[in-house]
Amino acid sequence: MANIWRKLNNEEMMSNNEFKTKVFGTFKPNFIQKFLISFGQKTFLKRGIFRGTYTTFIMLLSKGPLDIIFRNCAYRIWGEHNLIEYGLLLNPNYNSSDLNFLTEQASLDDNFVDIGSNIGLYSQPMALAAPKGKTISIDANPLMASRLKFNANASRLSNLEMVSSAVSDTNGVGSLLIRKNDVAIVALDESADEGIQIRTLSSILDEKKIMTIYGLKIDIEGHEDKALVPFLMNAPKKQLPKRIVIEKISQNDDYPGCKEAFDKLNYKLIGRSRNNSFYKLV
């Protein structure tokens, strides 16, 4: 772990104010970038091993970020080391099975929760699917929280509420670790007090007055058991999420604490995508 994980420093958690103040659409792709994006979306270049290099090349053809639309939502792509940005830019079907599972048959007033929201790959489509409900987006990295707020405002999603906090089994303060310099892969370190707020999921939901949850997605780099299990095992039945998408630990296995809780609470495994497992309350 020491070879690929390091502390996320304060500068990396700050926004680029030079471009942040520009309205969405200021950085729409130019003609050449539009062609390259379209070409990438139709070829092998949209695959994971190629996306990062190809995205970097596209970003070099203009100054600043890129403003794009994905699943009818606005995203400002910054061209940093962020696997999620690569997918949003180059794969129109990026994580589509996961998103479709979470949002299918949702009512307009349903609520969603996104733990480890990054720039809103899941949060924004969920909020769009239920405009009369609430979508609570939670991320420990202040930079991602800031960027998601910008994207939600650009998408005119007034029902999306951002919470800048880590989630664990107790309230406190910690620090963040980053893996391979990728801002999409950030983990909580509870051993160091460096200003990152830690809250329980139940305290966040109580504050936001969320009593029912249709869909919940969680991807927080190995902290899933500590963040989700205490909530599931102590929540009133009506507050249990009807659908859960959770990062898996191997091709056909899930975090042991969550798996045990799912069994006890009568969640059924519906399927798996490349990175996640899908559970439905029955």
Image (cartoon, rainbow, N blue to C red):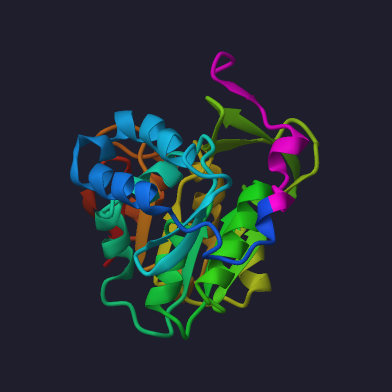
Pick the quarter of the image with the N terminus. Answer: top right
Pick the quarter of the image with the C terminus. Answer: bottom left
At a point 51% along the width and 44% down the height, the residue shown is 62
Q: Nearer the viewer, residue 24 or 227?
A: 24
Q: How many marks?
A: 0
At a point 32% along the width and 52% down the height, the residue shown is 263
Name the side, left or right, on which 3 lies relative to 258.
right
| Residue 33 visible somewhere in the drawing | yes
Q: Nearer the viewer, residue 95 or 150?
A: 150
On the image, which quarter does residue 102 sit in?
Answer: bottom left
The question of residue 16 being in magenta is answered with yes
In the image, is residue 111 above or below residue 99?
below
In the image, is residue 13 above or below residue 177?
below
Residue 55's spot in the image, x, y percent?
A: 41, 38
In the image, is residue 56 above or below residue 268?
above
Q: Which residues are magenta?
A: 1-18
Name the side, left or right, on which 13 lies relative to 60.
right
Residue 210's spot in the image, x, y percent?
A: 56, 75
Name the side, left or right, on which 205 lies relative to 115.
right
The question of residue 276 being in magenta is answered with no
At a point 62% along the width and 78% down the height, the residue shown is 209
Q: Residue lying at the far front in this picture: please name it.
A: 31
| Residue 273 visible somewhere in the drawing | no
Q: Residue lying at the far top in this picture: please name it.
A: 3
In the image, is residue 65 above or below residue 249?
below
At a point 37% along the width and 69% down the height, the residue shown is 72
On the image, which quarter does residue 97 sit in?
Answer: bottom left
Residue 87's spot in the image, x, y percent?
A: 36, 45
Residue 276's spot in the image, x, y percent?
A: 32, 45
Q: Nearer the viewer, residue 78 or 278?
A: 78
